[in-house]
Image (cartoon, coloured by chain):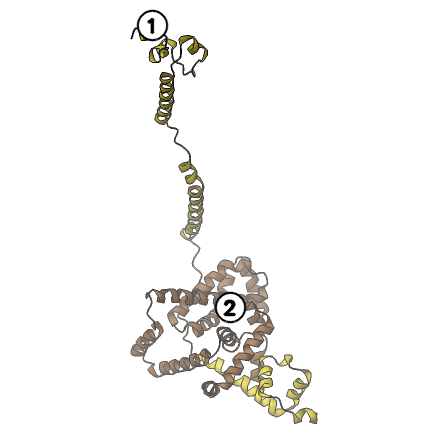
Amino acid sequence: MTIRDSAQTQHRPATLSPQIITLVKKATAGQRSAFNQLIDQYQNAIMRMVYYRVRIQMDAEDLTQEIFFKAYRNISRLKDPERFRSWLFSIAINRIRDYYRKNKFLKLFGALPEKEDTVSQNKALTYDSKVHENLLKQEFWQQVSNALNILSPKEREVFLLRFFDQLSLKEISQTLQKSESTVKTHLYRALSKFKKERSITILLGNGQNK
Amino acid sequence: MKKNQSRHLREDQILAAVVAENDLPVHLQEHLLFCRECSLKKDHLSQDLFCLGQKAVEMVPVISGRIRLPEKSRIFIFNRHFKNALAICSTIIFIFLAVWVPDWKSKPDFSKAQRDRQDSAIFMAEIKSLVENALPKEYQDIADPLDFGIQADFMQYIVPASDAPYIKKG
């Protein structure tokens, strides 16, 4: 596969397979087994999506579970089965926003330590045998954080959904309930800022030379 | 074609192509199709971003265990209904308190003791008025006081007419 082929594959709009659509229809009709199969299909994608934004494994797992429970409770409201993926991601986005709101509130009253993620990561580093791998991960996410910090919240969200979660522009617009042109504008601005930052060029270079 | 190839895409146009190639003007799309240099630039950027996404996937810890929906137990259903019922009851109680309690407070208390006290006060006021404004007997018969169901003799005893014999004697 050439560079062009792989890039085009990545940018192809993601449509749901007929098998998934059938499962969504069954789940909408109330079949638990069908929904369990959908969980199997999407749990890794949702876990990744949450982890990109939360960066604490335990919290990410808990949130992933809550997202699927919430989706199960509300799946009867889903009118168009083809929108299942974007619908699931919109639930996830909202749940993550709640998580941040709650954490902000807890931090305000000192009920939550300021750098919980760092503490847990350090603990993991102390006891984990794969210290080197963890250090690499930590460094990577630090670089990503630095890179994303130059973006506005909207640009960051669109960028993550497009290039990390690999959603199509249409799916992003459905997930964020914004028009496609707005999504494209945010994405364009994000890329413009990215190109200007030297740290990003290094990060992109690292990504390519994996 | 040569004309197209002579003017390469600017940096911002390459970025726009990465975002949505179809949104570019037709002549730029054609240029991108035939100009190797521009298409390579665009593809390299797309590839870099794609690789970044792929690397991020590798850097995410694997989820421990499968997610399963909780079993539909009777306790779970009961809890759900119980919560709903509790919410409805508390709402009703709140509305009841909010609407009826102020009404109760504003209404006077018509208990028996209070009614008796009010009657007594009216009665005493009437007696006081009659004592202060005593009339001859014939006038008293004309200006009959309010009927409280009291015997006339008793009334005469309490409020004697100004021409009563024992008053004259006194």
Left or right: A114 as drawn, with respect to A180: left
> In this rendering, is residue B91 above or below A108?
above
Residue B67 visible to an observer of this rendering: no
Is the C-beta separation of discs 1 and 2 under 8 Å? no
The residues tagged by marks 1 and 2 sit, at their Cα atoms, a distance apart of 107 Å
Pointer 1 residue: B165
The subunit carrying tag 1 is: B
**Residue B49, how many percent across, how many down?**
51, 82
Query: Judging from the image, what secondary structure is the residue with disc 2 in?
Result: helix
Viewer-closest of A32 and A135: A135
Report the front residue among A76 and B69: A76
Quick one: which chain is yellow? Answer: B
Q: Quadrant of the N terminus of chain B?
A: bottom right
Q: How many marks?
A: 2
Q: Quadrant of the C terminus of chain B?
A: top left
Q: Amino acid at mark 2?
A: Phe
Q: Quadrant of residue A10?
A: bottom right
- Colour of chain A in the rendered structure image: brown
| Tag in front: 1 or 2 | 1
- Judge the density around disc 2: few (<14), some (14-19), many (≥20) Cα neighbours within 10 Å: many
Query: Which one is in front, A6 or A49?
Result: A49
What mark, if any, has residue A34 been given in the picture? none
Determine which of the numbered discs, if any, sits on residue A89 in the image: 2
Residue B166 spot, x, y in % from top left: 31, 7
Tell me if residue A181 comes above or below residue A111 in the rendering: below
Chain to which mark 2 belongs:
A
On screen, B145 above or below A92?
above
- Say which amino acid is labelled 1: Pro
Secondary element under disc 1, as helix, strand or loop, is helix
Where is residue B36, by image quadrant? bottom right
